[in-house]
Image (spheres, rainbow, N blue to C red):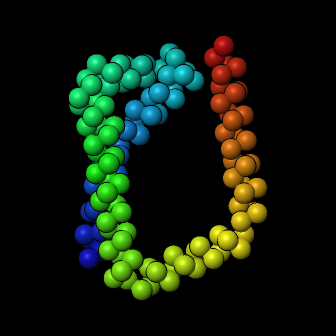
């Protein structure tokens, strides 16, 4: 059963990989315009059916539906998974304030990196 879940996880990542590459190319095209990432964005825009409908909608949707089905099946069949998930939620709830501070800190760092990269490229 573990090898089946490992295989399904790999398939899930392969299904979302084109969309992740496209989103990264969009970001990099704005941050570093000389990085040739515009070619990937142009390819997606010129191949509407394959680029938009298949790679950016159908494949991530299949990963979402398949992933929800796998998590739901695991939730029903594995009491250890349920226990671990409930413990994780309880821990997150107990430390919500610290996690919010850590999240805001990460977001602030990310914003500063984006602004610095924008200033360097200007």
Locate residue 4, reporting x and y percent.
Answer: 25, 69
Q: Left or right of 46: which side holds 88?
A: right
Is residue 75 something that shows in the picture? yes
Q: Where, quadrant-wise, is the C terminus in this rendering?
A: top right
Q: Left or right of 111: which side holds 9?
A: left
Q: Residue at x 26, y 71 (%)?
A: 3
Is residue 14 something that shows in the picture? no
Locate residue 39, reporting x and y percent.
Answer: 37, 19
Q: Residue at x 32, y 53 (%)?
A: 63
Locate residue 98, reporting x and y percent.
Answer: 76, 63
**Where is 96 relative to 106, above or below?**
below
Q: Quadrant of residue 102?
A: bottom right
Near-viewer residue (35 or 82): 82
Q: Quadrant of residue 77?
A: bottom left
Q: Where, quadrant-wise, is the N terminus in this rendering?
A: bottom left
Q: Residue at x 32, y 74 (%)?
A: 73
Q: Left or right of 109: which side holds 44?
A: left
The number of numbered discs placed on residues in the rendered structure image is: 0
Q: Residue at x 74, y 48 (%)?
A: 105
């Amino acid at each position: 059963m573990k090898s089946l879940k490992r295989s399904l996880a790999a398939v899930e990542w392969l299904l979302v990989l084109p969309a992740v590459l496209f989103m990264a190319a969009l970001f990099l095209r704005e941050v570093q315009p000389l990085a040739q990432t515009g070619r990937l964005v142009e390819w997606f825009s010129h191949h509407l059916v394959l680029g938009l409908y298949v790679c950016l909608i159908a494949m991530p949707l299949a990963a979402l539906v398949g992933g929800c089905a796998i998590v739901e099946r695991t939730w029903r069949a594995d009491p250890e998974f349920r226990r671990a998930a409930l413990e994780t939620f309880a821990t997150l709830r107990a430390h919500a304030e610290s996690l919010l501070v850590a999240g805001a800190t990460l977001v602030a760092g990310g914003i500063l990196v984006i602004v610095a990269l924008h200033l360097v490229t200007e």
